[in-house]
Amino acid sequence: MIQKYVYGNPFTTEAVVEEVAVGGGVPAYGSIETEQGFCFTYKMAEDDIVYGLGEANRGLNKRGYCYTSDCTDDPNHTEDKRSLYGAHNFIIVAGKETFGLFFDYPSMITFDVGYTRTDTLRVSCESADLNLFVIDGDSPYDIVKQFRGIIGRSYIPPRYAFGFGQSRWGYKTKDDFRRVVDGHRENDVPLDMVYMDIDYMQSFKDFTLHEKNFPDFPAFVQEMKDRNIRLIPIIDAGVKVEEGYEIYEEGVKNRYFCQREDGSDFVAAVWPGDTHFPDVLNEDARRWFGDQYRILTDQGIEGFWNDMNEPAIFYSQEGMAELKDVLRNFLENENGGGITAGEMANDRKREESDGAAEGQDVTNGADDDKKPAAVVSLWPLMGKIGSLANSKADYRRFYHNTKEGRVRHDKVHNLFGYYMTRAAGEAFERIDPDKRFLMFSRSSYIGMHRYGGIWTGDNKSWWSHILLNLKMLPSLNMCGFLYTGADLGGFGADTTRDLLLRWLALGVFTPLMRDHAAQGTREQECYQFENIEDFRHVIGVRYRLIPYLYSEYMKAALNNDVYFKPLAFVYPEDRMAVQVEDQMMLGNEIMIAPVYTQNAKGRYVYLPEEMKFVKFLPGGRIVEEVLGKGHHYVEIALNEVPLFIRSGKCIPLADTAEYVEALDTEHMTMLGFAGAEYMLYEDDGVSKRYQKPEDYRKLTM
């Protein structure tokens, strides 16, 4: 059962699309205060588990930390970060009482899950204007399925989007892309997509092509399609301010950009320099911006990824003006009587040397009055420089013109990425209503899951980020985001051969499987490493599993279910299974348990029931072993892909292929337990004609 409680005057986010009865009185769980903002408080039992929050840091069980929904462009996903790119305000409390809560609030909201007090869940936000949905259910899994039912069907990508994709910030020319395709095809490494980062544009202008590097773009798109490769270009949130740039001029003329309080177009610097942000919360502006995708679809493009849509801001004109004031004051009044920059640097070096000799923390010392005047006065300047990007003040400087009136951006900040991607999704319905386009985004809010998937942003080539990737998957699924994946190998920093292989072995199972890296980092295409046959094998296993992975994805999307589940959802009475966070159930037949530790030769796993341990070995060999319920140590080499098949279950397996459309799904083998059956879902992978009787086929082991 779901009830809705309305507080104040909520902004309509359209995250929930089904009618929900408005409850009278107060919710059955916790207490609510609305005198100073909004605060929900609930006393947790010792063994209560808290699930949800989608793209959030740390564990699957969210207890013990504080999380803030405040879409943030931050590439350093360290354990202390409270906000990432998404805002997914759905949680489930499971234990003494079991219930779900969705706080439909588009601004910053904080989830203190036993952080301040270990027994207290406290959800708070500045304004008491929100819709609260309270869900009662038999289990956490039941609550998730109820929630999925009211927020609408998850995005369904084209089938080719389950193939492997290669990306790198720094591919600039046609020959760069050709080299990537050649590197895969010549080494028999499967590939379906190559992603185009910002360098394909002319001066980083949305919906343009570099005039020198991409003449006759439709012919190049077709050249790639003839090799069974789709090009997937990036679209950023900011539109470059430039006279003669048609999209800029049209947006200014029709007032389609976000505006300052005085009505002038807000200016923020991003990759192109000065930009305006399309007012995607305004219906007319959203339709206009969405229609721009046609510029590229008319040239043969069938997929996109939206980026920088928190929206990210490098600096604003107002922010730079404030910085200049701080700098001017520093130089004129606060630098200790005209000390030069060189002298300040020498003072700082001497202080660091003295502090190091005395074992002091020279950057956070409490005794500031002992520091040289030049050094003391430097901190406001450094602080101002550090706060220029993604400034809270900047998010208060511009407005949206919505159906509900003029709204200051910070009040609806978490909706921007959602509505940018919605603009594209709605446009695709106009461009070709029966065709599926690939679309995923960096920033998101619940509701965006109907229009596209997400990738988890600018991660690092760190072993800890494989585990973080794994733990996010079921949490994202709970919030409707099924088409998800991380930058395999890590976006920032330099990857290693073993890290990439281990991460790919997890990526084999994620719907979005993409290797992506930042400019200036080590080249991490698979063919850049020795013993390329190992990479060929691991990615080849992905293609062998696509019939099963696609089938389970479609069943989850069409039935408001999840693709990834915590073990606790399947084995709720098994106390050990409930505690496991580094193994996940995928679909209804298999469990995955990737290796995520450097130099590990294998790992320990817990089996809640008898399962068949399967390893895919190079050369096409498969090793199978039935293991009983309990703890096991399993050896897994770098070039092996492991999975576990549940007792009495089986899965289909195809021969590998260079690209998805070449897969032979008529002549598959079965893997699992003798006598088991599997219901395969397989449609045309392109149209939106789902769940036809002929799409289902029973296969027997």
Image (cartoon, rainbow, N blue to C red):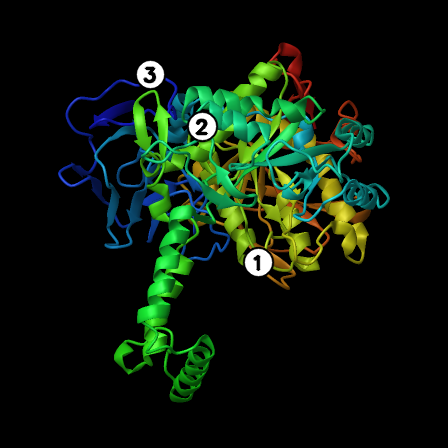
Query: In the figure, 64 relative to 624: above or below?
Result: below
Cα–Cα span, label 3 and label 1:
44 Å
Name the residue beneath numbered marker 2. 280
Q: Secondary structure at mark 1?
A: helix
The residue drawn where x is 72% and y is 46% is: 538
Q: Secondary structure at mark 3?
A: loop
| Res 499 quadrant in image | bottom right
Residue 388 in sight: yes
Number of numbered labels in the structure image: 3
Is 573 left, or right, of 308 in this rendering?
Answer: left
Name the residue beneath numbered marker 3. 19
Q: Depth-wise, is mark 2 or mark 3 nearer the camera?
A: 2
Q: Please, what is the three-letter code of the amino acid marked with disc 1? A: Trp
State the image coordinates of residue 503 (x, y, percent, origin top left). Answer: 63, 51
Q: Residues within 10 Å of mark 2 (few under 14, many from 20)?
A: many
In front of the other: 474 or 443: 443
